[in-house]
Amino acid sequence: MYGTHPTDGSKFSNSMQEYHQQGDFRFTAVLESYNWSSSRHMSTTTALSSAKKFEAARVGASYLVTDGDGAPLKVAAWLFGCAAWVFSMVILGGMTRLTRSGLSMTEWKFTGSLPPMTEDEWQLEFEKYKQSPEYKRVNKGIGLEDFKFIYWMEYAHRMWGRGLGIVFAGPFSYFVWKGYITRQLGLRLSAIFAMGAGQGLIGWWMVKSGLQEPEAEYAEPRVSPYRLATHLTSAFVIYCGLLWMALSVAMPEPPTYSVAWVKGAAKVRRLALPVSAVVAITAISGAFVAGNDAGRAFNTFPKMGDKWIPDGLFELKPFMRNFFENTATVQLDHRLLAMTTFIAIGSMWFATRRVQMHPAVKHLVNSTLGMAFLQVTLGISTLLSYVPPSLGTAHQAGALMLFTMMILLVHATRKPSPELLKSLQHVSKRVRFMTNFK
């Protein structure tokens, strides 16, 4: 049975009565924490103590877990662990693709299977691979030991995903049984679990496209860029959902101690939301670069070859295919989106540098700018180095890390609960009154 909301019914009423009865005590604590000697230079907003801010959060926050037996800490730790697991899955998937290991296993079972254990079993798997287009057109003549390497890479990627299913489903069932998880969170996590199960099917759907003979005589077999983008986007959505819910369980209220900081956070959020969309679109465009192997063309920067705008940008018909299948167009799109992302993040940093905000929010804005600079550097280095697996994997991890920074920023700047906001406004008025009185 799902846990009940901790602020429902009489418990909520009693908490609110206690909250209002302790108003004078809270105000006394505020005055003690207020630095009168510098009151003319300080905002009236730094007044609410952390203990009383937590009390307001306890009363007004919309809980996702019950409040007993250390449930918030346990559930949050589990969700953060699952999010980290998905992050590692994305990195391992990038390594699998960059080492051309993704097409080494030509069969798929939903429950998985044991790897080859004997020499005969390895030879049988190798013979299956020899029938694939990749072996015939790319890896013809490789030995059994080389095949074992790419096989183990793909096998590890698949089993790591199945391991995540166990790590997710086991604790989830336990927390539901204990009544830690509310119905609201339970439904969200059930949707995430369903997406995770579907991700395995999407992965095989993607791999199957690479096991078909290419239409062009000399074309290298590779997975469909559309299916690759679907697979990566699904991973990003699962990761985003897990991380957001983990943050919401761990921090039911945003970091703020004043009305001015709330207003400042709202300004940052108005900029962070569209910037987050640009970051996400840029990451998805990277999947089309990978799917078309476009990173191994035009390995110069800032020009593409000896031109700013390469030839043949719109040679495919119908016209829209160029943005997803034309190597030159796909790479140019990704370059333009990457620079747009960097400029957008830089503009957000510049526009908010004088806005009053919580130090944690300020740190996130600064860190996001630093991560954007690192990601652009990684992207250029990967391109100029002809996409070595090490740099290519780091660049993919950097994309997810930058997306993580934007999730943290958007989550930290969300609107506080009405109860906490009312408390902040009340304290701000009293402090302002005492400042004028003095």
Image: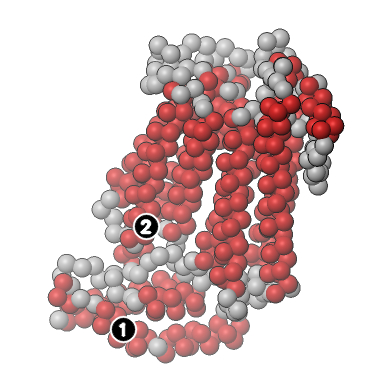
Given residues 330 and 134, the one toward you in this image is 134
Q: Could you say whether the residue bearing mark 2 is in a helix, strand or loop? A: helix
| Figure disc tally | 2
* Residue position for label 1: 29
**Cα gap from disc 1 to disc 2, whole angstroms:** 25 Å
Residue positioned 48% across, 51% down in the render: 407
Q: Could you say whether the residue bearing mark 1 is in a helix, strand or loop? A: helix
Q: Where is residue 30 in the image (x, y as percent from the top left)?
A: 29, 80
Q: Quadrant of residue 175?
A: bottom right
Residue positioned 72% across, 62% down in the render: 170
Q: Position of residue 162 (x, y in %)?
A: 72, 49
Residue positioned 58% across, 53% down in the render: 83
Observer able to see residue 27: yes
In the figure, 142 relative to 51: above or below?
above
* Residue position for label 2: 361
Q: Where is residue 361 in the image (x, y as percent from the top left)?
A: 37, 57
Given residues 117 and 351, the one toward you in this image is 117
Tell me the amino acid under the disc marked 2.
Val
Dot 2 crowding, Cα within 10 Å, few <14, some 14–19, many 20+: many
Is 394 placed left or right of 143 in the picture? left
Residue positioned 48% across, 88% down in the render: 17
- The quadrant the N terminus occupies is bottom right
Tell me the amino acid under the disc marked 1.
Ala
Q: Position of residue 427 (x, y in %)?
A: 32, 77
How is the protein colored in the picture? secondary structure
Observer able to see residue 288: no
Q: Which mark is residue 433?
A: none
Given residues 280 and 421, the one toward you in this image is 280
- The quadrant the C terminus occupies is bottom left
Q: Which residue is most to the front?
A: 119
